[in-house]
Each structure stands twice: as structure tokens, then as C-alpha cells.
Image (cartoon, helix red, strand yellow):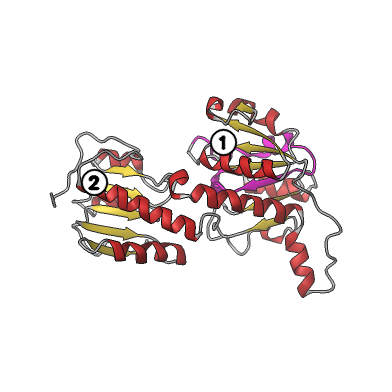
């Protein structure tokens, strides 16, 4: 089988690729990066960490399956894939252990922002900067998690161990763990009103672009901290900048931004109350191993013509492998 590996350059995708090369000895594995055309037209399966457009799919007439190497799949043109007969699958975070990696990182962002870590680190290098006098604590803090799926539930579990009081908001409140009081998404503004931290772990869609806007931020309590480990499109960043500058919000911990890599002239970078990292919450050895194992299991099922549990669409008719 001819398999394409489509991803930007980076340590995380390179680690996945190296491991796959060692395991897929009977297949042809072809690597290329976004910004260039596919090096071979007869690729049948695409393993992707980059944006998969209609034009890319049309340039691969034998492509019959796209396996996204992450839980999020908003970079794939799903309408085009279905129209062209191409099945698409993602890599569920609770199976690959991406969810565990991101949940751990969420706690890091919360502590870094609440303890003013950016200022503390800067004060080590510049004695003229006054180190923070005191910061917030997770013990006894009220935390509202927006999106209580696999990642949100794991975040909640870790925060309870710190002694935080955790509530949630979700489109389907009945799926939340029974020990997490959960409100429907329609009650978002009411749910975040009393929270010291609002944590975003909801999947990005066209419908929830800028769901955390100026109106929602104004309903948050004074001094509250916003944490985003989901997708940058969820937050109106101009409104966030204003809410922090005005003193209404106490800060933000962001592993994702609407424009990545983060532009050097981004005004959020100038605010000491903001702790920003470059979309790395899931980048762990744990997640590399889990993603590789899951991709291999999907490829085995494709070859055996078995169902794929994480398949996201059902094109009819669908393209089939020419290798079988």
C-alpha cells in the first residue's frame, strides 16, 4: 500500500514518522510538507497533520482514506472528502493519550498564569522587574470547563486532586461525569459568571467561532483567568486583549491562538498577564506512542476491510484500494 505522510516539519511529527518507518516495512511511505504538491499521484492512504484541502484530494486520484493524526480534524475539507468518496478518520485523544498529555499541560498553564510565571522568569533576567508578590491557587478555586469530553473530563479529574471546585458546560450535559455539575451550552454566560478559571476544551467548529466574545467575557467575574488548550478560533482575541487591559480579566493562559505561529506583533504578547505557548500541549512521548499504535491499527483494519471506529464520514459511493 502507498501511504502518504503529510505534515509540517517538527520534532513531534518526525518522531511519529520515524516510528512508522520502522513498523511499515511492507508498505511504501512517502513524506511531504504543506506548501508543496504530492510527490506521487498514486497514494492510497494519507496520514495527515496538515490542512487537507479539496485541491490536495483531487491531486490524489487513488486516495481512498485520510487518517488525521490528531483528535481535531477541522483542517480537513470534510465536504470535499465525502463528495470525492474518501473516508476520513481522526485519532481519538482518549485512545492515543493525547487527552492525558493536554490535561497535564492545562494544569501547567493554569498555575503559570495564576502565579505570574512570565513576570517571575523575566525578573530573574532583569533585576529592574519586580517579581510577583503573590498569585492565585488551584486549592479552593472555582473552575468552569467548557467542553467536558475526553480532554475536559481528564482536566476535571486532575483539578479535583488539587482541591478545586469544578463545574462544566457542554452541548450534551448528560455525557459529563456524574461528579461534575454540568450546564447546557445555552447557559454559558451564567455558568462562567462565578468561575476563577474558565478552561476551553471544546472542539472547534464553524458554529462556535469566537464563542468566547466580549459579551461572554463581560459576564465573567473580575479577575478571572481564561485558559485555552482547544483551538484559537474559539476566542475573540481582540476582545480578550481589551478585557485584560481594562483590568476586568486577570489574565489568560493560551496554548493556541487564532493565527499560528503567533505573530510577533500580536498585542497579547505584550501583556504580562498572558502566558502563551506554541500549541504544544499534546507533544509528549506518551502521545507519540499512542498515535503511532492507533494509526497502525487503522491501517490494519483498512487492509482487512474492517470497520474503523473513528471514521467521521460515510461517502457513498466510496473509493476503494487498488492494492487489494
- The residue at the point 66 percent across, 53 percent down is 109
Left or right of 247 on screen, residue 85: left
Task: Give how far apart the Cα atoms at labels 1 and 2 are.
Answer: 31 Å
Q: Residue 313 falls in which quadrant of the image?
A: top left
Q: Which residue is mark 1?
A: 148
- The residue at the point 30 percent across, 40 percent down is 308
Q: Badges 1 and 2: C-beta atoms under 8 Å apart?
A: no
The one nearer the camera, 115 or 265, is 115
Query: In the image as oriented, which residue stretches furthest toward the front?
Result: 161
Q: Residue 288 falls in which quadrant of the image?
A: bottom left
Estimate how packed mark 1 is, as few (under 14), some (14 to 19) or many (20 or more) residues with alpha carbons within 10 Å.
Answer: many
Q: Is residue 219 shown above or below 226?
A: above
Q: Is residue 52 shown above or below 130?
A: above
Q: Which mark is residue 302?
A: 2
The one nearer the camera, 13 or 104, is 104
- The residue at the point 51 percent across, 59 percent down is 284
Q: Is residue 53 visible?
A: no
Q: Is residue 172 magenta?
A: no
Could you tell me residue 72's position as x and y percent? 45, 46
Left or right of 138 on screen, residue 48: left
Left or right of 99 on screen, residue 92: left
Q: Secondary structure at mark 2?
A: helix
Left or right of 142 on screen, residue 107: left
Q: Is residue 232 magenta?
A: yes
Q: Quadrant of the N terminus?
A: bottom left
Magenta region: which residues? Answer: 207-234
Amino acid at each position: 500500500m502507498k501511504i502518504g505522510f503529510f505534515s509540517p516539519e517538527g520534532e513531534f511529527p518526525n518522531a511519529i514518522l520515524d516510528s512508522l518507518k520502522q513498523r511499515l516495512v511492507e508498505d511504501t511511505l512517502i513524506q511531504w510538507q504543506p506548501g508543496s504538491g504530492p510527490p506521487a499521484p498514486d497514494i492510497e492512504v494519507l496520514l495527515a497533520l496538515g490542512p487537507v484541502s479539496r485541491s490536495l484530494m483531487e491531486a490524489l486520484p487513488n486516495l481512498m482514506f485520510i487518517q488525521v493524526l490528531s483528535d481535531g480534524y477541522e483542517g480537513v475539507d470534510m465536504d470535499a472528502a465525502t463528495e470525492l468518496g474518501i473516508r476520513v478518520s481522526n485519532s481519538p485523544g482518549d485512545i492515543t493519550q493525547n487527552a492525558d498529555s493536554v490535561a497535564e499541560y492545562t494544569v501547567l498553564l493554569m498555575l503559570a498564569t495564576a502565579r505570574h510565571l512570565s513576570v517571575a522568569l523575566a525578573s530573574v533576567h532583569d533585576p529592574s522587574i519586580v517579581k510577583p508578590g503573590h498569585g492565585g491557587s488551584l486549592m479552593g478555586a472555582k473552575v468552569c470547563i467548557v467542553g467536558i469530553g475526553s480532554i475536559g473530563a481528564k482536566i476535571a479529574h486532575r483539578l479535583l486532586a488539587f482541591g478545586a471546585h469544578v463545574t462544566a458546560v457542554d452541548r450534551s450535559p448528560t455525557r459529563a461525569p456524574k461528579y461534575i455539575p454540568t450546564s447546557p451550552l445555552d447557559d454559558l454566560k451564567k455558568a462562567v459568571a462565578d468561575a476563577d478559571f474558565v478552561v476551553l476544551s471544546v472542539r472547534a467548529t464553524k458554529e462556535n467561532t469566537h464563542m468566547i466574545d466580549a459579551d461572554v467575557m463581560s459576564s465573567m467575574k473580575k479577575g478571572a483567568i481564561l485558559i485555552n488548550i482547544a483551538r484559537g478560533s474559539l476566542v475573540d482575541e481582540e476582545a480578550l486583549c481589551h478585557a485584560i487591559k481594562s483590568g476586568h480579566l486577570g489574565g489568560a493562559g493560551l496554548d493556541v491562538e487564532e493565527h499560528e505561529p503567533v505573530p510577533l506583533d500580536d498585542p497579547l504578547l505584550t501583556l504580562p498577564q498572558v502566558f502563551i505557548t506554541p500549541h504544544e500541549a499534546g507533544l509528549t512521548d506518551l502521545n507519540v506512542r499512542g498515535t503511532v499504535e492507533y494509526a497502525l491499527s487503522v491501517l490494519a483494519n483498512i487492509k482487512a476491510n474492517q470497520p474503523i471506529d473513528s471514521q467521521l464520514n460515510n461517502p457513498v459511493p466510496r473509493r476503494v484500494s487498488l492494492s487489494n
